[in-house]
Image (spheres, grey):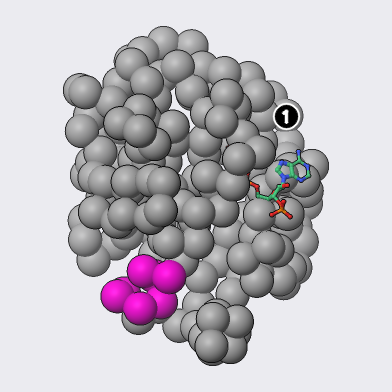
């Protein structure tokens, strides 16, 4: 569990979180640059939540994010040291992603002692790249045709931040 000024990041509760997370994951805007198309059925989201719950502590650490008791998204390491995050389009632009992902990054370095944290972003995903840059991440390289989403090939921009760089920023 992580608490920030406005948010609570907590472990997933697959049954309880199904309705709120499906409402986000069926949204084309939330899923435009995700690794899969929007979820058409609750079953798809249930499977996704079950996978999130099955992450072993040595493999990764993913959180459901709540603001004022409402589920607004998720942020964490689906697999160390890879970051993944998604927020309800209804709350975009209020700095919640920055607050949540910043807390996850801090924990990744301070608690999990990761030497380096990375992220894989679709080059069209301006909001996600801006968020990473604001947290101090820098682009390392690009690769074409990394994800087949539905019947469309998508590209990747890779971002990374080392513990040393993070320490210099927060010093
Ligand atoms: C990426 C995402 C998490 C950003 O969420 P958000 O709530 O808008 O983020 P924040 O409010 O914390 O903003 C972070 C920064 O990005 C900027 N930003 C947000 N949306 C933007 C956009 N469409 N274009 C340019 N910049 C944008 C904000 O202005 C802010 O920068 P600032 O601190 O300089 O003001 C959100 O768009 C999302 O959930 N997208 C769908 C899922 C996804 O693509 N996840 C990432 C996969 S790699």
Note whether residue 44 is visible.
no
Position in image of residue 82 (x %, y %): 48, 60
Residue at 60% across, 82% down: 169
Q: Residue beneath label 1, please?
A: 152
User: Helix, strand, or loop for circle 1?
Assistant: strand
Residue at 38% across, 55% down: 4
Classed neighbour count for the residue bearing mark 1: other residues with Cα under 10 Å, few (<14), some (14–19), many (≥20): few
Q: Is residue 162 magenta?
A: no
Residue ranking furthest to the top: 41
Residue 92: name its quadrant. Answer: top right
Residue at 41% across, 77% down: 109
Q: Is residue 46 left or right of residue 83?
A: left
Q: Is residue 108 magenta?
A: yes
Q: Which residues are magenta?
A: 106-112
Q: Is residue 96 left or right of residue 146?
A: left
Q: From the image, which quarter does the N terminus lie in?
A: bottom left
Position in image of residue 37 (x %, y %): 58, 24
């Amino acid at each position: 569990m992580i608490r920030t000024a406005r948010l609570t990041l907590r472990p997933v509760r697959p049954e309880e979180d199904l309705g709120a997370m499906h409402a986000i994951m069926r949204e084309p805007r939330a899923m435009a640059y995700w690794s899969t198309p929007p979820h058409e059925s609750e079953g798809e989201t249930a499977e996704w939540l079950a996978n999130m719950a099955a992450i072993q502590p040595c493999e990764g650490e993913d959180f459901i994010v709540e603001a004022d008791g409402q589920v607004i998204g998720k942020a964490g390491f689906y697999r160390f040291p890879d970051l993944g995050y998604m927020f309800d389009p209804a709350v975009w632009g209020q700095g919640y992603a920055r607050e949540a992902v910043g807390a996850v990054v801090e924990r990744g370095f301070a608690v999990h002692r990761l030497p380096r944290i990375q992220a894989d972003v679709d080059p069209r995903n301006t909001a996600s790249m801006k968020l990473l840059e604001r947290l101090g991440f820098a682009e390392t390289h690009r690769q074409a045709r990394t994800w087949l989403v539905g019947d469309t090939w998508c590209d990747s921009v890779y971002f990374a931040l080392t513990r040393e760089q993070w320490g210099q920023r927060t010093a």
